[in-house]
Image (spheres, rainbow, N blue to C red):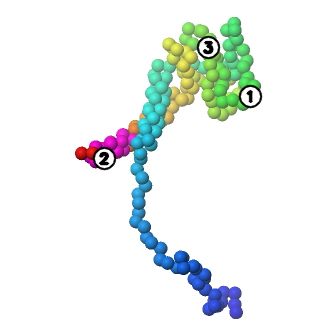
Amino acid sequence: MGLFDRNSDIRLGEHRTEKEKKQREVRPYKPPRPLSWLSCGILIVLSLALLAYAAVAGYMRLFGVYTEAAVFTALDESGAVVEAMPATVTSTLPITFADATGAMHAAGISIMGNFGGIGDTVAIRYLPSNPERIMLASQTDEFMIPFGSVLLGVVLLSVALRRLREIFGKEKDGNI
């Protein structure tokens, strides 16, 4: 008897139970369920958020003033720029910048990644009418991010509205 010799006494097929021996029933394909009105509402909210982000980035690009802001700095009570190193790990970077009139402003921007120490600068855009409204210049100068937001927002909005028309169109036809 060799290693690969088949013995006629042992067959794997004989171990199956009666349930397993029965022929399995073939079920017809059922496509996934389409979007419900609730998921269409979520898509609409998401698409409106994407379109709003693109509008804000575009508005800041057109009407925002470009300037450099000093990182890890803040304004004290007298309006002088002082060092402001965060005590803990944070994603908000304290900055100060001078607007077009020369007035100093302090703000915090959300960041990802590391920045250097005091004296380094970061490019920002602010609105002349409201200098507290700022964005990183990299978010406004990049063309593809707002364009992608508009494109994705329009696609999601059209899918949701088309599905809502189907949902409420069927309900009307069913009532008549």
Residue located at (47% from left, 32% from top): 49
Which residue position is annotated with label 3? 105
Q: Nearer the viewer, mark 2 or mark 3?
A: 2
Residue type marked 1: Thr
Q: Kindly identify which residue carries mark 2.
A: 170
Question: Residue 59, relative to residue 155: is it above or below?
Answer: above
Disc 3/disc 1 C-alpha distance (Å) = 23 Å
Mark 2: which amino acid?
A: Lys
Classed neighbour count for the residue bearing mark 3: other residues with Cα under 10 Å, few (<14), some (14–19), many (≥20): some
Is residue 122 toward the left or the right of residue 154 in the image? right
Quadrant, the N terminus: bottom right
Q: Amino acid at mark 3?
A: His
Q: Position of residue 82 (x, y in %)?
A: 72, 14
Tag of residue 88: 1
Task: Name the residue nearer the viewer: 89 or 35.
Answer: 35
Would residue 84 be seen by someone viewing this image from the given angle? yes
Residue occupying image coordinates x 56% and y 17%:
132
